[in-house]
């Protein structure tokens, strides 16, 4: 019997302590991404490095973060989410400590791109798995509160970094950020699993793969060995069988059977495209405000603060509304995509200050809808035992599309030398996801509604027959 199904999910209780712990982890680790330019660009300029090097470091960081999904499914199945999250915090702290003593650009690639990127990739799905086991109807607001921790960190940590850089210098500032990320270990200690983790064979895969079929038998299997056949005469292991067994173990460990589902492909590719467009917008938005809209640095900072502030507020309030109305997570995600598309188009058409301010607020609100419902959409589609693998495959799709479509968006910006065309290109990507998702969601909703109506009709007919028999 599945342990998960045999126990009642509290939908709160100790789960709110887990939510607070995840918010602490996000605030001290996930928000590190928002201060990359503030921390490292000045030091890279001292090393006579150009913008290409900074972009390479951030792209490799995103690549390592998302391709950690290759290992996250087996890791969560073999170890507790608490241990995976703690390992991620340690890797982030180690990577930042390496960056503090960097003297060449490749030191930043090693420390920030790979150590910090891989560590953050371990943190996000493992903390979501910890929250997911404690909530059902309140899952959206629990995830929203935990992600608000990252938003709060994005507001507070830049001021801390500015103070440390102005008063203590680069090395002390980065070491302080490294120490701050270790506070995530305190939060990871509270990620107590609701149910004991199911025993998984990932740790034994190598030993099992090395064994031949003759060396491994079932407890109910009877093996008959001829007495006139010596041990040295046994046939060598079948290579085809070994390869087949390796393939089966790989499929089980990473839940690759999810890739047979066309709807799952649609979900992870669509979310990866939205993720890529969001990253690109975050990168070009300050330049758009300064060079195209002709705003001064104070107004640029104000508009960016509006985006962050609206994002934080909606991470707290939006799940309360959507959970109360029982709107499916994927539908909320789709609404967020539509809002982001509208904001991109309006910004490209009109650069008046009131319009920019209103669209900055709308962008923050709609961004929260996509961020909150990212993993929730995967959890709604995948069974609980396949969720870890589904999250890993989603991360891998993001890594692939960021390094391809993301680079293409950067090329469009440089080739056209226009932020407006780049905004239109982002809008085209968002519109493609909307056009691809909407018919499918409507079809699935209509089919589910017809099935519900048919079931209700069957029940009413049965009730009528019972009444007739009783009379």
Image (cartoon, helix red, strand yellow):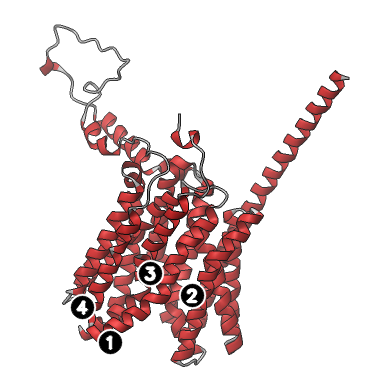
Looking at marks 2 and 1 on the same chain, the residue that comes earlier in the sequence is marked by 1
Q: Is residue 325 left or right of residue 89?
A: right
Looking at marks 3 and 2 on the same chain, the residue that comes earlier in the sequence is marked by 3
Image coordinates for residue 153, horizontal then vertical, percent: 40, 71
Residue lying furthest right: 471
Q: Which residue is mark 3?
A: 31
Looking at marks 1 and 4 on the same chain, the residue that comes earlier in the sequence is marked by 1
Mark 3 falls on what kind of element? helix
Q: Which residue is mark 2?
A: 308
Residue lying furthest front: 13
> What's the CA distance linking mark 2 and mark 1?
24 Å
Mark 4 falls on what kind of element? helix
On screen, residue 311 above or below 137:
below
Q: Which residue is mark 4?
A: 171
Marks 3,1: beta carbons within 8 A: no
Q: Residue at x 31, y 58 (%)?
A: 186
- Viewer can see residue 319: yes
Mark sitting on residue 166 = 1
The residue carrying pointer 3 sits among few (fewer than 14), some (14 to 19) or many (20 or more) residues within 10 Å by Cα, namely: many
Looking at marks 2 and 4 on the same chain, the residue that comes earlier in the sequence is marked by 4
> What's the CA distance linking mark 1 and mark 4?
12 Å
- Viewer can see residue 428: no
């Amino acid at each position: 019997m599945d342990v998960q199904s045999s126990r009642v999910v509290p939908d709160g209780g100790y789960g709110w302590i887990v939510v607070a712990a995840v918010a602490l982890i996000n605030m001290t680790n996930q928000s590190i991404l928002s201060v990359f330019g503030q921390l490292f660009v000045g030091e890279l300029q001292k090393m006579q490095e150009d913008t290409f090097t900074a972009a390479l470091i951030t792209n490799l960081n995103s690549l390592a973060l998302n391709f950690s999904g290759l290992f996250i499914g087996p890791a969560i199945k073999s170890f507790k989410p608490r241990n995976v999250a703690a390992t991620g915090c340690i890797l982030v702290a180690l990577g930042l400590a390496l960056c503090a003593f960097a003297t060449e650009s490749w030191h930043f690639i090693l420390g920030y791109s790979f150590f910090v990127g891989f560590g953050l990739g371990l943190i996000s799905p493992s903390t979501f798995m910890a929250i997911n086991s404690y909530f059902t109807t309140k899952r959206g607001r629990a995830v929203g509160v935990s992600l608000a921790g990252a938003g709060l960190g994005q507001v507070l940590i830049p001021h801390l970094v500015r103070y440390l850089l102005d008063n203590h210098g680069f090395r002390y500032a980065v070491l302080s950020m490294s120490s701050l990320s270790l506070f995530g270990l305190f939060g990871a200690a509270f990620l107590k699993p609701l149910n004991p983790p199911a025993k998984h064979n990932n740790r034994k895969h190598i030993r099992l793969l090395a064994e031949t079929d003759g060396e491994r038998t079932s407890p109910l299997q009877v093996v008959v060995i001829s007495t006139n056949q010596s041990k040295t005469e046994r046939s060598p292991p079948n290579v085809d069988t070994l390869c087949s067994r390796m393939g089966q173990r790989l499929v089980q460990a990473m839940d690759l059977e999810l890739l047979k589902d066309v709807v799952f492909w649609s979900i992870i590719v669509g979310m990866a495209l939205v993720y890529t467009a969001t990253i690109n917008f975050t990168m070009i938005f300050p330049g758009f405000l300064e060079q195209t809209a002709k705003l001064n640095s104070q107004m640029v900072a104000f508009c960016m603060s509006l985006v962050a502030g609206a994002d934080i507020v909606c991470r707290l309030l939006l799940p309360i509304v959507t959970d109360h109305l029982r709107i499916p997570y994927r539908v909320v995600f789709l609404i967020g995509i539509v809002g982001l598309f509208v904001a991109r188009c309006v910004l490209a058409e009109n650069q008046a200050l009131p319009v920019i301010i209103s669209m900055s607020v709308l962008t923050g609100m709609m961004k929260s809808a996509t961020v909150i419902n990212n993993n929730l959409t995967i959890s709604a589609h995948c069974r609980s035992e396949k969720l870890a693998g589904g999250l890993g495959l989603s991360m891998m799709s993001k890594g692939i599309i960021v390094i391809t479509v993301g680079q293409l968006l950067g090329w469009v910006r440089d080739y056209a030398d226009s932020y407006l065309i780049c905004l239109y290109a982002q809008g085209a990507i968002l519109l493609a996801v909307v056009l691809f998702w909407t018919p499918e969601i409507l079809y699935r909703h209509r089919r589910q509604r017809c099935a519900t109506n048919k079931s209700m009709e069957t029940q009413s007919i049965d009730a009528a027959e019972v009444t007739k028999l009783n009379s």
